[in-house]
Image: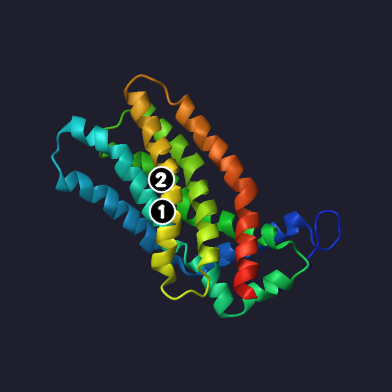
Amino acid sequence: MAGRREGDDGEPGGVLAGLGWALARDLRLAVRTRSELAVQLLFYAIVVTLFPLATTPERTLLMTMGPGVLWVAALLASLLSLPRMFALDQADGTLEQMALSPWPLPAIVSGKILAHWLTTGLPVVLLAPLAALQYGLDGEAIAVLVAGLALGTPILSLLGAIGAALTLGVRGAGGLLALLVLPLYVPVLIFGAGAVDAVRAGLGADANLSLLGAGLIVAALGAPFAAASAVRIALD
């Protein structure tokens, strides 16, 4: 825990200071393990590429199943890296130091969640337009898909952080984590894929995107505190 632990006001325990420290630290660690990030992106690319190859090349069918496939692939790619969000820090004792630091633990957890999204969710958002071309989606549908992923993938990281914290130190944590978070991911999947389907049907995607935006606000306000509480319980 190196460096000054001061917020913008010069007092210890600053929320922004804790968030920034955790974000910078996790991003540095992610850069050092570039191979693991590459595996996640490769997994996403393989999943979205195999479906068109394994099904009929009929354009209408590809356009119909494309949004769902892209969202499921994004969900699974996010899920792959969730067990590592807190487990590695717990194994080497860093997580306990974070809990004892003068920075608020929810701020540190927020930084770790943001780092998780930047290294897993954001690349998926950026790759989505290219992947969507394989399914014959038009420009408007692709724009809505990207907007939905930009709103929905942070929710996946936020909800996943709660599950990752709840399963800290539990045997078979990976399987249990999937069982915990996958039901929570279902509404995000439905509204995200539904936004593209609504555009294709001529209904407009405003309702679905608004629900995703509302979900992001609620998750951003509550998930860091819930995950921080679960981390403290795991450390006790």
The location of residue 159, given as percent across then percent down, is 52, 53
Residue with the mark numbered 1: 182
The location of residue 207, given as percent across then percent down, is 48, 26
The location of residue 122, given as percent across then percent down, is 48, 49
**Identity of the residue drawn at 15% across and 34% down:** 58
**Identity of the residue drawn at 47% across and 50% down:** 121
Work out whether residue 139 can be spotted.
no
Distance, label 1 to label 2, CA atoms, is: 7 Å
Check the picture and name the quadrant holding the N terminus.
bottom right
**Residue type, numbered disc 1:** Leu
Check the picture and name the quadrant holding the C terminus.
bottom right
**Identity of the residue drawn at 81% across and 62% down:** 6
Left or right: where 228 falls relative to 44: right
Q: Depth check: 107 or 211 in front? A: 211
Disc 2 is placed on an element classified as: helix
Eyeballing the image, is 110 above or below 97? Answer: above
Q: Quadrant of residue 128?
A: top left
- Residue pushed farthest right? 10
How are the residues colored?
Answer: rainbow
**Residue type, numbered disc 2:** Val
- Do residues under tags 1 and 2 come within 8 Å of each other at their CB atoms? yes
Residue with the mark numbered 2: 186
Disc 1 is placed on an element classified as: helix
Q: Depth check: 226 or 129 in front? A: 226
Work out whether residue 226 can be spotted.
yes
Left or right: where 156 falls relative to 22: left
The location of residue 139, given as percent across then percent down, is 36, 28
Mark seen at residue 27: none
**Identity of the residue drawn at 50% across and 60% down:** 163
